[in-house]
Amino acid sequence: MLRKFICHGFTFIFTAILVEAGPEPRAEILEHVVAVKDVCAWPKLALTPKGEVIAAIYNRPTHGVQPGDVEIHASTDGGRTWAKRGTATRHEGETARFNHAVGVSSRGEILVVSGGWSYHPTDAKGAAKKKKLLRPTASRSADGGRTWTISGKFPDGADGMTLVPFGNIETGADGALRVAAYSYNTAVSPRVDVAYTAVSVDQGASWTLGGVIGRPAANETDVLHLGGGKWLAAARNLGRTGERGHSTDIYASDDDANSWRLLATPTVGNQHPADLLKLADGRVLLTYGDRRGPKFGVSGHISADGGRTWSAPLKLATGFGSRDSGYPSSVQLADGLIVTGYYASMSTLYAGYQMGVVRWRLAEGPAP
């Protein structure tokens, strides 16, 4: 379309190109299964070079108040059925390992970084109370998650506080591994939460402290490598008490995760924490727990511009019995199918703690 404008005696002619927005993406749900029963799970999924889906999960049916470990469960049929492979951590005494991140190194090893808690002696009713954060350990498996080598070489935060790992372990263009980990200080009010990256240049054997992603309220954070020096991070924003209701902020880095800037806030209060996945077509999938109630579930958004703008919500799972649910994690198979794992304390599929899985495809436009 040609348009002519006259300004201060000069005539300007230009061509206006009208671009219509494409159809909104939608989720085509194929199957919904209870993958592992009687585990709180907080699953973190990864895809192995063989195309297997592995899930790192907390193996006790409580919200982190029983001694336990991070187990590895695997699916060789695209998320339909699951079997235990091994245990990535070794808790000692009255402790539990369950704050965890997972990934696969460039040489095919499964990696788990895991923190956790020690406990006070249980009371007369058998209830445990958290005592002290455990320093994270780094576990590596070269046989698909069956046996593990464990290292204690993981840093503290810049303020000397113990870090809590979360999300995916990603490989950068420089070959180094990066994972998000956060610290929090409850000695001040409001509390201060700082999300960092931790970096490994030796395939996960040891880790050093990287850059700050967000503060003072950046909590559980997942990082995603987009290619080159570009990264995204999705951070649970605690905000000031009563103000934000724990939404999800998107941060971006153009210098290999050294410095970060706030890019977008695609969710509202009580939609957190989130997982990021780069899809085969280059778009980014964000999934998160929808804890707004009275209906609880897992939803997602799609970004086609590197995290700046996001689609309308995609409903992936519903029917959870309480806010004690969510924490999704996703992988995409070679045929394009997406497998999203989550946890729930109860659902319409099972009355107890569970790791659930939804198998789905991304489609465009209205449902047929």
Image (cartoon, grey):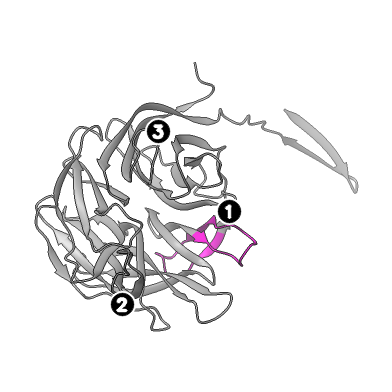
Distance between mark 3 and mark 2 Cα atoms: 41 Å
| First along the sequence among labels 3 and 2 | 2
Bounds of the magenta segment = 236-262
Amino acid of disc 3: Thr
What residue does disc 2 label? Answer: 155
In this rendered view, identify the residue nearer to me: 352 or 162: 352
Residue 11, position in %: x, y?
A: 84, 41
Which residue is located at x 28 percent, y 49 percent? Answer: 39
Which of discs 3 and 1 lies nearer the camera? The answer is: 3
Residue 226, position in %: x, y?
A: 40, 52
Q: What secondary structure is found at the residue carrying circle 1?
A: loop
Within-10-Å neighbours for mark 1: few <14, some 14–19, many 20+:
some
Q: What secondary structure is found at the residue carrying circle 3?
A: loop
What residue does disc 3 label? Answer: 348
What residue does disc 1 label? Answer: 265
Which mark, residue 102? none
Q: Is 29 placed left or right of 291 in the picture? A: left
Amino acid of disc 1: Thr
Within-10-Å neighbours for mark 3: few <14, some 14–19, many 20+:
few
Whether pointer 3 and pointer 2 mark residues with C-beta atoms closer than 8 Å, the reply is no
